[in-house]
Amino acid sequence: MSPEEERVIRARQAGRAKVMALLLGGFVLLVFAISIVKMTH
Amino acid sequence: MTPTATTLSAAPPVADWRDFLALCKPRVLTLVVFTGLCGLLAAPVSVHPVIGFTAILCIAMAAGAAGALNQWYESDIDALMKRTRARPLPAGRMSRESALHFGVGLGGFSVVLMGLATNWVTAAILLVSILFYVMVYTVWLKRRTPQNIVIGGAAGAFPPMIGWAAATGDVTLMPVLLFTLIFLWTPPHFWALALFVKTDYGNAGVPMLPVVAGERVTRQQIGLYTIPMAVAAVAPWPLALAGWIYGTVAVATTLIFAVLAAVVTFRTSDAGMKPEKQLFKYSILYLFILFGALVVDRWVLA
């Protein structure tokens, strides 16, 4: 694998990790909001 | 074992996050989300915004999962069609295993979240819609019969019913009519597309109606299916399930649809495919307008 190919793969992995972190953060907030709604309604 | 240059180059491709997004067929998702949202907003019961948002998110995730599993199963024929060969799997940007895991995981997650956030009736319908699209349409019908999109069209007809069920917890005549409308809308919509991408489907060996039965039969079928579709579109008005706003919009937009379908049906010239492309584009707009009118009608006249 050339350094250029490795750089591309690392960039993709980093991009996926960032998107996954955002999605997980969003999921935590969503579950929190659903819990509050279920408890108050 | 330390990976060598050989094992690394033979390793499966590392897909970009945009490839996973493309796997969900985002353009199809817009119509699915919109009709699901309209089903939710047209229901006679108001739903908390957080629960409503979650329900729509689950519909989108389930549709994305179904799209991913569809692309996983069809990567061989996608590679043969000009329209689909740039997708992540046929283009070699993603491994089939990744697509399968992503589709199954996303689908299962959407069903569980829907059940926990809304109710299990809605979650069950959501699960059926995913299984119907993947098992009945993709695996069973698509490569076997020209009636594939007629029966498979039911999969795309579920979202408004799911949206409605998320709000009310049950399924009544109105969501069944909305289901019927999309079910009957699918054949003219897809066959109009199939008429101008016939060669693509033929090359891939997909038995779409124009490939198997020819253009003439396809045109007749477009005209025939438009009739019950028009009835289903207007029916909520005389049945007092929707008001005059929806009724007026439904009559006007369905008339335009019928005229465009009639032009395609009675056309004998093979020169160009402008009327077919017009019908295809309008059919998408038609559904957006019709469902939008339903929500406006419900909110204004409620």
Image: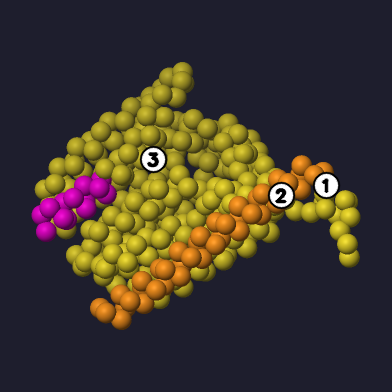
Q: Quarter of the image for the C terminus of chain B: give it.
A: bottom left
Residue B230 falls left or right of residue B158? left
> What colour do you see for chain B?
yellow
The reply to the same-chain question for discs 2 and 1 is yes
Q: Chain of mark 2?
A: A
Q: Position of residue B97 (x, y in %)?
A: 68, 59
Q: Position of residue B137 (x, y in %)?
A: 52, 55
In the picture, which chain is orange?
Answer: A
Residue B301 lies within the magenta run:
yes
The residue wearing badge 2 is A9
Residue at 33% over, 27% down: B263
| Marks 2/1: CA–CA distance | 10 Å
Residue B14 lies within the magenta run:
no
Determine the secondary structure under disc 2.
Answer: helix
Q: Position of residue B202 (x, y in %)?
A: 60, 36
| Marks 3/2: CA–CA distance | 44 Å
The residue wearing badge 3 is B188
